[in-house]
Amino acid sequence: MGKYVLSRLAWLPVILLIVSFITFALGRFGPGDPVEILMGQYNDEQVIERIREQRGFNDPIFVQYGRYIKDVLRGDFGESFKYRGRTVSELLKKKMWVSAQLNIAAISLSLVVGIPLGLFAALRQGTLWDTGTVAFTLLGQSIPVFLTAPVVLLVFALKLDILPTHGWGGLFDTRVILPAVVMGVPGIAIITRLTRASTLEVISQDYIRTARAKGLSEFTVQRRHVLRNAMIPVITMLGFSLAGIAFTSFIVERFFGIPGIGNLFIESIFARDFPIINAVIIIGTTMFVAANLIVDMIYPWLDPRIRLGGSYAA
């Protein structure tokens, strides 16, 4: 296991260098000069040129990138172009935690509802309950977030007036309910379908019939053999969700006025605030690689036949 983990970690710097350089180059050669955007109406060429010289924008691209990576390795992502006088790390730290809490609430809702619902449908295959569950999942996946958000706002906030419409008060505040539901419904649908399909595949295996033939109770068979092996696809999907736990709520944050990383990232794109854009992409890539490594390490625990190389033991 240690050799496998080290080999995966060895690729992390390579991936980060490739992704960060592409993002950095797009920021330097892409449309829109951040200095001109920063200046706004005061388009003084001499002032713009002086700022570019001070920030090192006139240096060769590899010199700029090398200087940037050197600072990043010390944990310094630079200073924001838009929010002058404030470092990127200062801006991201609090907002990432807000977005992470929102995503935790949404993922928890998806798992708590989706896994039991998928098992329920699979164990009643062919019945009306199974058909209704499949129909619900298709509906949940087909409705986009930008349609669900205004509907729940209209019903629960405007018409019923039972839940707050915007703002943020933490993970245990009532203001997290509506955005968590909006983000969690598609997740419920996906996890339900994954759990159902995987469970149907598992219960048809010989070892399930053998476990029942040994006289094990149905609860023990489902808990120890069915559920554990059926969770492999769900864990894979959960790994992708955890990878973007602090970055995947852009639309919802805009709708509900949540001061998370989503709002900041969208504003940074419009403002060409490349230090923030680069930092978000680098952190997101690191989390993606780390989350997938953790998922790979969970596989053998769920199914001992799986080796960390990705194959089944003989």
Image (cartoon, helix red, strand yellow):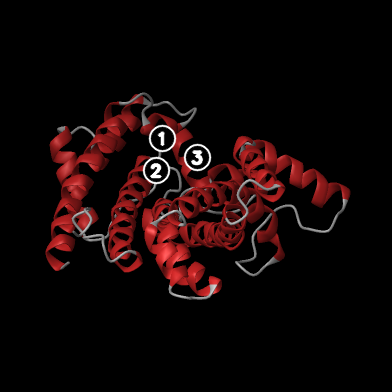
Q: Closer to the N terminus: mark 2 or mark 1?
A: 2
Q: Closer to the N terminus: mark 3 or mark 1?
A: 3
Nearer to me, 129 or 7:
129
User: Which residue is denoted by mark 1 in the rendering?
Assistant: 272
Residue at 44%, 43% in the rendered image: 82
Label 2 and label 3: CA atoms lie apart by 14 Å
Nearer to me, 239 or 303:
303
Residue at 67%, 67% in the rendered image: 173
- Kind of residue sitting beneath label 1: Arg
Label 3 and label 1: CA atoms lie apart by 10 Å
Q: Could you tell me which quadrant the N terminus lies in?
A: bottom left
Side of 94 where 185 appears, left or right: right
Q: Tell me residue 105's x, y (percent).
A: 58, 61
- Kind of residue sitting beneath label 3: Ile
The answer to whether mark 3 and mark 1 are in CB contact below 8 A is: no
Residue at 39%, 43% in the rendered image: 81
Nearer to me, 126 or 212:
212
Q: Residues within 10 Å of mark 3 (few under 14, many from 20)?
A: some
Q: Residues within 10 Å of mark 1 (few under 14, many from 20)?
A: many
The answer to whether mark 2 and mark 1 are in CB contact below 8 A is: yes
Label 2 and label 1: CA atoms lie apart by 8 Å
Q: Could you tell me which quadrant the C terminus lies in?
A: bottom left
User: Which residue is denoted by mark 3 in the rendering?
Assistant: 266
User: Which residue is denoted by mark 2 in the rendering?
Assistant: 81
Nearer to me, 101 or 228:
228
92 up-or-down from 36: above or below: below
Foreground mark, 3 or 1? 3
Q: Tell me residue 6's x, y (percent).
A: 14, 62
